[in-house]
Amino acid sequence: MDLEGFLGSIRVVPVVEAPSAAAAVELAGVLADSGLPCTEITFRTEAAAEAIAAVCDRVPRVTVGAGTVLTAQQAEAAVEAGAQFLVSPGLDREIVAAGRRLGVDVLPGVCTPTEIQAALAEGLTLLKFFPAEAIGGVSYLKAIAAPFGGVRFVPTGGIGPANVAGYLALPQVIACGGSWMVKKDLVAAGEWDTIGRLAAEAAALAGSEFGAPGPLGAPAAAGSGRQGEV
């Protein structure tokens, strides 16, 4: 399954600011158990690369992406840690080139027709739409997506349970990114039950296909996870 197919099966991507590798591992297990076997760990904390590596090692049933990738060096660190895809807030050709060199997909952020055309010139058709709500929301995305029939979007920014369905109803939208089920205060406090409930509600709201495989290989058979997997 490729990245677009994977994201289209889960429909919601939890966007995580991991305070530590241990918290990221615990969180990844909770998300997977709740029907969202994916996490985008952002480079907004010092623990990002370590957290990516820990989740990839200890929770292999979870597909791990790296978010807020701002440089080619961060892209290299993320992939070295095990990240299976990269997400950037904007379109940076050096990051796109790094992703190609490293063999992983890159979702650059766009919010204007000019940026979409620039992404198309790079051969990219799966794009992050950011900042979704601040730039105009569903109506704006519907308008700018209309001329670009072959492009699919992952909106992120200001999306939550009250508006995610509106985005997912657009045929151009593959999935949405959001942090409402993994808010920093909940993660910091270890509120795993609350996070699990919110993640399960998000998965149900989005119609996620429970247990979807990662984009870079078949899912592990039941009970075949590595020793120590949470």
Image (cartoon, rainbow, N blue to C red):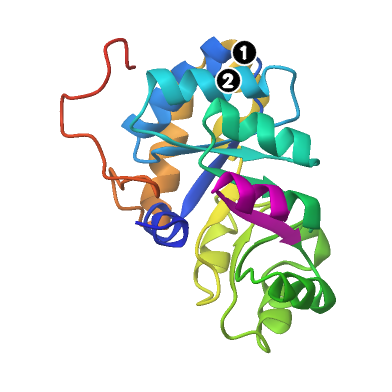
Please state which of residues 13 and 106 is positioned toward the viewer in this rendering: 106
Q: In terms of image quadrants, where is residue 151?
A: bottom right
Instruction: Specify whether residue 118 is in view.
Output: yes
Residue that badge 1 annotates: 20
Kindly identify the residue that appears in the image at 66 percent across and 87 percent down. 146
Where is residue 55? Give x, y as percent.
47, 23
Judge from the rendering whether residue 204 lies leftward or rightward of residue 169; answer left or right. left
Q: Is residue 107 magenta?
A: yes
What is the crowding at mark 2: few (fewer than 14 residues within 10 Å), some, or many (at least 20)?
Answer: many
- The quadrant holding residue 222 is top left
- Which residue carries the number 2 mark? 51
- As for residue 126 lying within the magenta part, the answer is no
Depth check, mark 2 against mark 1: the one in front is 2
* Front residue of 222 and 155: 222
In primary-sequence order, the first of circles 2 and 1 is 1
Circles 2 and 1: CB atoms closer than 8 Å: yes
Point out residue 18 in the picture as x, y percentages from the top left corner: 63, 22
Q: Is residue 174 left or right of residue 115?
A: left
> Could you tell me if residue 157 is visible in this image?
no
What amino acid is at disc 2? Answer: Ala
Q: Is residue 75 above or below residue 194?
A: below
47 w.r.t. 39: above or below: above
Residue 42 in percent (x, y) is at: 67, 33
Q: Quadrant of residue 23?
A: top right
Start and end of the magenta stretch?
A: 96-109
Image quadrant where one finds the C terminus? top left
Indicate which disc residue 224 carries: none
